[in-house]
Image: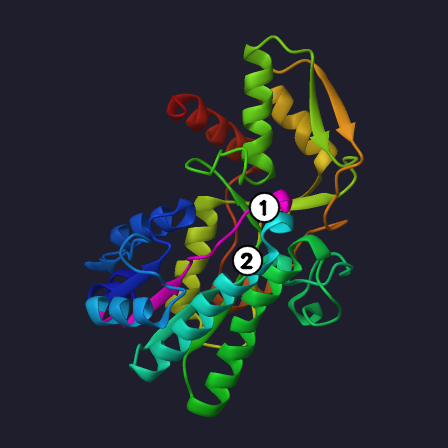
Amino acid sequence: MSQENFWQSKRVCVTGGAGFLGKVVCRKLQERGAREIFVPTIEKYDLVSLDGINQMLEDSKPDLIIHLAAQVGGIGANREHPAEFFYNNLMMGVQLMHRAWQTGVGKFVAIGTICAYPKFTPIPFDEDNLWNGYPEETNAPYGLAKKMLLVQAQSYRQQYGYNAIFLLPVNLYGPGDNFNPDSSHVIPALIRKCLEAKEAGKDEIVVWGDGSPTREFLYVEDAAEGILLAAERYDGDLPVNLGSGNEISIKDLVELIAKLTGFQGKLVWDTSKPNGQPRRALSTKRAYDLFGFKASMTFEEGLKNTIDWYRENRK
């Protein structure tokens, strides 16, 4: 079935559709011929409450749900709000999938998180290692809350034959990212820090940790593409990574962002701050084998686009 035929007759509900990734998913849905896309706003629908979920399902009557909505943040936000991150993400996801099954929603695409992986996972992270240990402590409550959607998807498929799939995107970045210093992730935080230091004529910036951890990043356009390919082509019970296959140390990342933003000062490492998980890099084989997804954006190009977007939009 062509992409257009797949989406044309479907009513699609995208929770978190007004967010960073959600906006790109919705735009790509339109490009693929989807005519009815419902985006619940946080002001109108409290998806942590069952009443909010029921109201949303009644108003949207979806054939397919892409559940992107989540309460997220960097290490600092996770350390300050572990209980909220656990409760809100768990209640949102578990109740929504349960009601989707009960009300006959045809397919449920659950979006997990790389934080669900054990702290010490062999590199590259293979989906088969998902249960071999406890996640990194700073984001374990969030990671485990999202991981429960995998358990739910598999058990609902087993008992009810329900078509719920579970995807694990790695850290995202790109134009439209969250640049709020209190809640942003590492790339937008560093871009902002470098640009502001450069403009203020500062000769150094302070960076958390010691620079040794590695991370993998996925451009937001690629992530949206992977999610939609899975929605179109994948109906299985296995969890699937979405990544770029490109591992980079935080030290190299900071140096690259400094170079691209034109910041020439010194990098000072605050080793009293946590590093987070030691290494993160994904095996991307399963996504390619099961639904033909492969990231296409090069990292440097993606970073340039992100920096350009922030320069133009921050005012």
> At which x and y percent is residue 196?
55, 18
Query: In the image, 198: left or right of 109?
Result: right
- Answer with mark 1 or mark 2, whichever residue precedes in sequence: 1
Display coloring: rainbow
In this picture, residue 3 sits left or right of residue 236 = left
On residue 77, the disc is 1
The x, y position of residue 269, in whole percent, is 77, 28
Q: Nearer the viewer, residue 289 or 140?
A: 140
Type of the residue with mark 1 = Ala
Is 116 positioned to the left or the right of 12 in the image?
Answer: right
Residue at mark 2: 85
Q: Position of residue 116 (x, y in %)?
A: 63, 62
Q: What is the quadrant of residue 47 in the picture?
A: bottom left
Residue 2, can we see it? yes
The magenta-colored residue range is: 61-77
Residue 301: percent from left, percent from top: 52, 32
Q: Residue at x 67, y 13 (%)?
A: 264
